């Protein structure tokens, strides 16, 4: 079993897509082992996306992530990191495969509905950024 970190972003929460995304997640064999709905502060969003701080989209991305509530999750499944990235689809929804969350729900590259860790080290950082070990129940 491998844990990954996921976010349902403000565009999807705002359009009441949380349940639909959770349903797809569980039906693909993931266990939601931790979950909370919060509004991020700008410093929290900036710290979370620190690897992108030199990128031209950093300011817009971090501000966007604070425009409304998000749902933060730890997901668990065999091969969880890769499996969740496959279920999300490509970062740019215009390039996402049929049947992926981003293909079906994302608005554009910024408002792309969901986030997922891209590697084991990133998953470890991202999980611990938002969750204490006591909040995760496998
Ligand atoms: P996410 O998987 O959360 O990781 C970083 C986010 O930056 C990405 O999804 C997109 O929502 C956002 N983003 C905005 N512009 C770009 C871009 N040009 N390339 C990659 N990510 C971008």
Image (tube, rainbow, N blue to C red):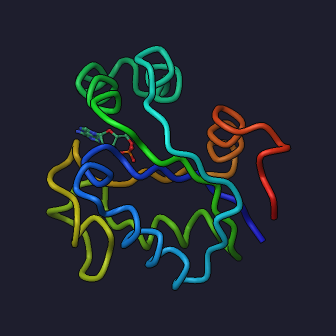
Tell me, yes or no, if residue 118 can be seen here: no
Which of 112/70 is in front?
Answer: 70
Identity of the residue drawn at 22% across and 59% down: 106
Residue occupying the far right of the picture: 134
Q: Is residue 120 above or below residue 26?
A: above
The answer to whether 134 is drawn above or below residue 2 in the figure is: above
Q: Residue at x 29, y 82 (%)?
A: 99
Q: Position of residue 9 (x, y in %)?
A: 36, 47
Res 114 → quadrant = bottom left
Q: Position of residue 35 (x, y in %)?
A: 61, 52
Q: Determine the residue positioned at 34% across, 67% down.
A: 89
Q: Quadrant of the N terminus?
A: bottom right
Rendering quarter of residue 19: bottom left
Q: Quadrant of the C terminus?
A: bottom right
- 95 with respect to 122 (left or right): left
**Count of residue discs:** 0
Q: Of 5 and 54, which appears nearest the observer?
A: 5
Report the image quarter containing ligand 1.
Answer: top left
Residue 8 location, x and y as percent?
41, 52
Q: Is 40 rendered above or below residue 71?
A: above
Describe residue 132's horizontal placement relative to residue 29 as left or right: right
Q: Specify whether 90 is left or right of 110.
A: right
Q: Is residue 65 above or below residue 111?
A: above
Q: Is residue 109 visible?
A: yes
102 vs 25, nearest the viewer: 25
Q: Position of residue 98 (x, y in %)?
A: 24, 81
Question: Which residue corresponds to the image point at 20% horizontal and 61% vertical from the top-left?
Answer: 93
């Amino acid at each position: 079993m491998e844990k990954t970190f996921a976010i349902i972003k403000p565009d999807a929460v705002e359009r009441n897509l949380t349940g639909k995304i959770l349903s797809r997640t569980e039906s693909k064999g993931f266990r939601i082992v931790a979950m909370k709905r919060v509004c991020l502060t700008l410093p929290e969003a900036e710290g979370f996306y620190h690897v992108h701080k030199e990128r031209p989209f950093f300011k817009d991305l971090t501000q966007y992530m604070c425009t409304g509530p998000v749902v933060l999750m730890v997901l668990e499944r065999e091969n969880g990191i890769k499996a969740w990235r496959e279920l999300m689809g490509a970062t740019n929804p215009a390039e996402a495969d049929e049947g992926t969350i981003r293909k079906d729900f994302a608005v554009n590259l910024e408002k792309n509905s969901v986030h997922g860790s891209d590697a084991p080290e990133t998953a470890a950082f991202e999980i611990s950024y938002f969750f204490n070990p006591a909040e995760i129940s496998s």
